[in-house]
Structures are given as structure tokens and as C-alpha cells.
Amino acid sequence: MTLPSRNALVPFVSVDNMMRLVLHIGVERMLVELAQAIEADFRRWPLFDKTPRVASHSEIGVIELMPTSDGETYGFKYVNGHPANMKKGLQTVTAFGLLADVETGYPLMLSEMTILTALRTAATSAMAAKWLAPEGARTMALIGNGAQAEFQALAFKAICGITEVRLHDLDPAATAKCARNLAGRGLKLTACHTAEEAIEGAQIITTCTADKQNATILTDNMIGTGVHINAVGGDCPGKTELHRDILARASIFVEYPPQTRIEGEIQQLAPDHPVSELWQVITGTTPGRSDPRQITLFDSVGFAIEDFSALAYVHSRLRASGLYQDLDMIADPDDPRDLFGMILRAAGPQGA
């Protein structure tokens, strides 16, 4: 997996280069390829180290580390979630990530992950819907039109064949922004005044709101049979979007139960409430949608393996694109035992 390097230089993908890479590949193509990479890693799920993310919570947000390894490559992501940041003109979520070689422990790549997380979250959502949504679904309600919304809409278009998106946000400016950014991309867009209006005729309902609270974006009486719910916004303790009664009626699918029971919609349920793991649906050991009238719910909180897949995908594209910088971040003395001597030699003859 290593890129050509000299003097232990580490490839770094800046925000600018990540944007260039997305445009170089194409947004929808990149979403499709990310979904394929994530699905491929879900098929080898047992190979990975798995642990709930290490979280530091405060009243105003959370800072988390998300590590995993497949035995050959190690990856982690640093990510925050601060809903109040938006009022300060700051991003709600920011992130960076690193890949390393397990054999040597040396970093292989450091990358921004604010943009990449938005892409991998949308790709994972659409990948799950490919397995769980009703056959022939073409209309999606998108409730919450913030930073994640456009990525979700384009992922569902490219991967699941969605042709219509019904938009709703408590802030009309967010809906207008989302509609403006999606204009001309082959989707029929409808701005809706209420969540109830948005879900009319939708076979897929995506919720991706940001407030850190137990909210009720969807009530039980709003949800008819046969729909797929993609619950993205409930992703930490005390932050949910769905009424508990919806969960009681739905077949629930999750990434990693020990993490989702702490952070997802199912934090509202008993610890032994039955859920299915998405990787087992993909490998054919657990059924996905089995009845046209079934309500399926992907309780998405994001898991480290998805970030590993996204980082590995970006790493695989760097050689051809050249869209990275070399960082001098690993000390590399001629004699591995003489780190102090390397410092002295850096000063030249006088300093030595």
C-alpha cells in the first residue's frame, strides 16, 4: 500500500487536494466507488479489530477517536461533533485521519476527513439502502438540509436510482442552499414546508439533523408500512431523531451493536432489543428486507471500518492523481539509535 517516499516523508491530503481529487474523479463516481470499497470491507468484517469509538463528551459536543486494523494496515479518524458551531460560522463536524503500516508502525498517509467523512457517510447510507430499501424506490424525503444533505441525495441517486428528493429543514435557507447545489444534477427537487409534507410518497426517508438532543423528527403516525428509514443524525448519547414507537415497529439494522446501542436511535430501547448487523446482510447470513410491508431502519452512527475503507480508497488514488504533499513528520536518522546525533548534525559544524 505504500507510496514512493524519501526520507520517511508521509503523503498528506489537504482540504484543497481532497476537493481536487473529488472533482478529478467526479462526485457521483467517487460515491459509487467508496460504497464498493466499504461493502468489500464489510464482507471481510471478522478480520478487523472492532471497538466502540473513544469519545470525550461535553455539554456542547463530542470529540472522538475511531481506530481499526485489518492486521496489515491500521487506520484511525479524529472527529468532533459540535452542533452549536454552525451559529459561529464553523463546521458542525471536522475530521482528519491516518493510515499506518502494521509491520513497521510507520504512517502511510495523513488526510483531511471533513469532506471525506461526508462522502463516506453518504456512500454507507446508500450502500445500506441498496440491501434494505423497497424494490423500485425512486423518491426520497431528505429531512435536515445541512452539510450532509447534498452528499446523501447524490449517493442515493448514483447507487440506488433515486430520481426525486423532497427537501425539508426547519431553516428555509438550508433547503434553498441544498436545492441550489443540487440543481441540474438529474434530480427532481421539491421544497416542503413540513416533515409530514416531505415524506408524502417517499419510499425512503433520510433524517440528518444536527441538534444534540433527543428530538422527534419523525412520529409514529407519520410512518406507513413498506418504507426504508435512513437515520443519520442520531449519532451520540442523548441525540436521537425518531419516536421510540417507530423503532418498535421496524426491523433495525446497525453497523456495530456495542457502539450503536450507546449512540444510535436504539439507545432508546432495552439493551437486548433485537437488531441485525449490516455486514451479515451483505454476506448473506442474515436476511435484509423480507416483506414488502416491512419497515426497515438503518440506524447509522458511523463506524471505524467505513473510515478505514475511505482512507484506503483515497490512498489507492494518490499515485495516479499526484494530489498530495509530502510531510516531513517521521524522524529518520541514518543510525536508528542516534536520534540525538541527528539533531546535532542539523545545526551544522558549528552547532555540533
Image (cartoon, rainbow, N blue to C red):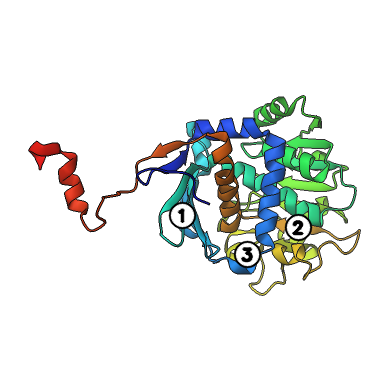
Q: Residue flagged by tag 3: what amino acid is it?
A: Tyr
Q: Nearer the viewer, residue 156 or 165?
A: 156
Residue in the image at 89% along x and 52% along y: 135
Residue 57 image offset from top left, x and y in percent: 46, 55
Check disc 1: other Cα within 10 Å, few if <14, some if 14-19, many if 20+. Answer: many
Residue 8 image offset from top left, x and y in percent: 37, 47
Closer to the N terminus: mark 3 or mark 2?
3
Q: Residue flagged by tag 1: what amino acid is it?
A: Ala
Residue in the image at 79% along x and 67% along y: 284
Q: Nearer the viewer, residue 274 or 330?
A: 330
| Alpha carbon distance from label 3 to label 1 | 23 Å
Find disc 3 in the rendering and name its residue: 256
| Alpha carbon distance from label 3 to label 2 | 14 Å
Indicate left or right for 239 with 158 as reference. Answer: left
Which circle marks residue 100 in the picture? 1
Residue 70 image offset from top left, x and y in percent: 55, 63
| Alpha carbon distance from label 2 to label 1 | 34 Å
Quadrant of the image containing the C terminus:
top left
Q: Are marks 3 and 2 in contact (CB under 8 Å)?
A: no
Residue in the image at 81% along x and 32% along y: 187
